[in-house]
């Protein structure tokens, strides 16, 4: 799996983000460009205490999510999005 700490992977991500517009069509689900960017930022903001949103979940969900985040397997497409991450 690519790491954003590698210069090439970081550059690819930067280029992809710069190409997103409000009219960008969804490639994974139903969100538009603005909704997708908000969706990607929401968990990061929660992790660094820059959000008023709280996620109520039990320890098992947290363990499974953490395992998924560090797995080399790509995320599955069209997985449900928590309501707190939708705009």
Image (cartoon, rainbow, N blue to C red):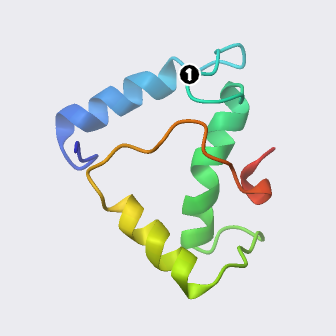
Quarter of the C terminus within the rendering: top right
Residue 20 location, quadrant: top right
Residue 44 lies, in percent from the top left, at 54, 60
Q: Residue 54, percent across and down?
A: 74, 74
Q: Position of residue 82 (x, y in %)?
A: 72, 57
Residue 49: image quadrant is bottom right
Image point (48%, 67%), residue name: 65
Task: Report the number of discs.
Answer: 1
Name the element at disc 1: loop
> Quadrant where the N terminus lies?
top left
Q: Is residue 20 above or below residue 60?
A: above
- Measured along the vertical axis of the image, is residue 35 above or below residue 79? above
Q: Which residue is mark 1?
A: 27
Residue at x-position 72% and y-position 36%? 35
Q: Residue at x 63, y 84 (%)?
A: 58
Vertical side of 39 occupied by 66: above or below: below
* The furthest residue to the bottom: 59
**Label 1: how many Cα within 10 Å (few below 14, some 14–19, many 20+):** few
Of residues 38 and 18, the one drawn nearer to the viewer in this rendering: 38
From the viewer's perspective, is 47 left or right of 34?
left
Residue in view at x 23 percent, y 42 percent: 2
Task: Name the spot of residue 25 as percent of width and height, x first.
Answer: 65, 15
């Amino acid at each position: 799996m690519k790491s954003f700490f590698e210069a090439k992977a970081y550059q690819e991500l930067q280029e992809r983000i710069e190409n997103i517009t409000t009219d960008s069509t969804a490639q994974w689900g139903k969100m538009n460009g603005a909704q997708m960017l908000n969706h990607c930022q929401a968990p990061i903001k929660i992790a660094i205490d820059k959000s008023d949103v709280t996620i109520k979940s039990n320890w098992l969900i947290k363990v499974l999510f953490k395992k998924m985040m560090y797995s080399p397997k790509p995320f599955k497409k069209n997985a449900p999005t928590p309501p707190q991450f939708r705009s």
